[in-house]
Amino acid sequence: MKIGQTYKWSKQMNDTFKGFFNCSTKEELVLFKEELWRDYPIDCQKLIKRSRRFVSGCYLFDNEWDMEKTQIPVYWQIAEIQWENSPNDDSEWNYMLNRHRFLVDVACAYLLTDEEVYRVYLEDFLRVFLKDNPLNEKTKTYSWRTIDVGLRLVNWIKIVEIHRFLPLFSEALYKELEQVIQQQADYLYRNLSIERGQSNWQVIEIAGLYSTSVAFSRFSDSQQWTQASLFYLEKSLELQVEEDGMQREQSFTYHNEVLLCVLEVCQLAQRSGREWPAKLADYLNKLVTAASIFVKPNGQQPAYGDSDEEDMTGILQYAEALVTKSTNKKGSPNFFAKLSLGRGSFPVENQFLLQSARHYFAQAGIMIVKKAGTYHLFKCGPLGGGHGHDDLLHFDWFYKGKDILVDSGRYSYEINKERLTFKAASAHNTIVVDQQNFQQHSDSWNSLKVATPINQRFIEKNQIYYMEGGHLGYFGLSDPVYVNRKILDFPEGFSLISDLYMCQSSHDVQTAFHFNSVDVRRQKQKFVSSDLEVEIISIDERAQLAIIDTAISPSYNELTNSKCGIVSKKIQGTDSNSYLLAPKGLIQSVKIIPVYSDGLELASSVVTAIKIDLQEGKQILVINQLQEPDNGRRAYQVEGQYYYGRVMVITDSDRVVLY
């Protein structure tokens, strides 16, 4: 069946619905096909290759923004599919199967090639799915979870958009599809609630419900669905979008998934000439602005919380096309954004792919410094919920186009697949006391004990960035320990980290540095990586350095070998350590300088003075007060000079008091 072939179909879908692909006539669908082949030939071939896999019975979920990707193919003929059983011992596999994102690719492959095999597959797959998955108490646990129904509705609507002018199903199957679309929308409508508004689930469900209400405006309840969708979307965003714009669950993947759903609702409202409330527009702008700040300079999303290292280019271009009004744009969107926007010209300038940003997300406790290909993320904020990790005082380091120090990722949501190992503090670039986690979890999602973050501070002066935070997670020990971290990022390209451990008795303290490399070796008090071209210097000579084999998870279900540098220290009472992160060869030497006050030398647990010699003879002195002196704060004497302040940077030409 070719485009334009006469086909009798039910007219429940709105005749003028432009939807996601922006096509309301067969001629526009032909133009869309021509645009895809003309401007994205390589991406079209990749889509066709993915689709051929599924048609041949090879199931591998690796599309952009697949929430839980798979790495190993599973071979099933349609008649053999066991909808409730996971072939890789991970229930997320079944959820991915039941969301039907891959069916949109198959429908697009038929549009692009006119090859009958894709249409036959769609007919056969959906016929068997509908037969095997009626709504009942059993299917509610796998194919009828509300989140998956919401995602599936959006995907089915995209397929039906194509079906109007390029028939994909028999008339009998399409009539059944319409009935189930109506049933699924009603199911989502009946599950809406204020209480569920804190979760990304409800926003995802609303995207499916709202899409159905617009696409199938002839359904008797469509107007009611529209009104409920907008009401509960506003309430949901009110509960889960922080004032600083960050989604509350402390995971960039779910921040962007919520953003994507709101963009879809916004797009359908715009194209159907419907109301787009000012409050929803405000929440959308907040979500987009936050995403534009936390995206790395290479366009990637950090593996923060339950997140993958995903390319954010397409979703930010999609946002730009919908929420900005500039008429002078000249660039073209990438393939993901094009498929999201559909037929037509949508020029972009990558306004939201910021290469430079400095921001403190006060509610989320996330600090970002992004400049000239360099990126620091520092976390000192709430757990956020089940998708949050034990990452207080964790930091990411991206330098000159390379990930250097990274979050270990999430790997799996299954307890039996090291879920809690990847969630633990030891999987992050932070401090662990007495080999104990500072938070405790009962399972993959629920917590028994959560640390309180305090003392957050973000300051910029003279292109020096100062980030600070501490937490009370170790106050439950018989001898409580307060941990605090300061990070100073310098314009010369290096950073100084200063950690404080306040306590009364003895403890074992370990600090982890998770490298994005297996090429890491120890040189005395340094970790050195030749392929990353960086080094980390532990300034305290008493600390013990070791390198261990470990793994990071850039994507769900994926493990990559890596190395982790561990700095261990046995302390007796309050103590500290400092580290320099720098490109290889930049730091020529570093030494601790005595600090005096009222003629008395002060302990390094009170204040430190670190002198750093750089290439080309530049010298920097950093004076860092770690705690208040017993006799009160006075001027500090270092090498015969007097200085007053808590954190100071001194060079031959400048004296900067950061705090």
Image: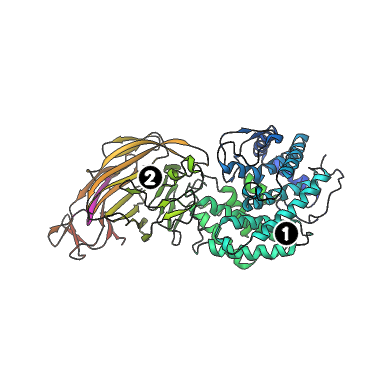
Q: Position of residue 317 (x, y in %)?
A: 60, 51
Q: Position of residue 350 (x, y in %)?
A: 57, 51
- The residue where tag 1 is placed is 213
Q: Is residue 292 visible?
A: yes
Q: Quadrant of the N terminus?
A: top right
Q: Position of residue 611 (x, y in %)?
A: 24, 49
Magenta part of the protein: which range? 603-613
Secondary structure beneath disc 2?
A: helix
* Vertical relation: 228 (above or below) 99: below
Q: Position of residue 155 (x, y in %)?
A: 69, 48
Q: Is residue 332 visible?
A: no
- The residue where tag 2 is placed is 426
- Identify the residue at image location x=74%, y=61%: 222
Snapshot colouring = rainbow
Task: Name the outermost residue toward the left.
Answer: 599
Report the Cα–Cα distance between label 2 and label 1.
47 Å
Image-based side of 25 in relation to 425, left or right: right
Report the front residue among 263 and 476: 476
**Quadrant housing residue 230:** bottom right
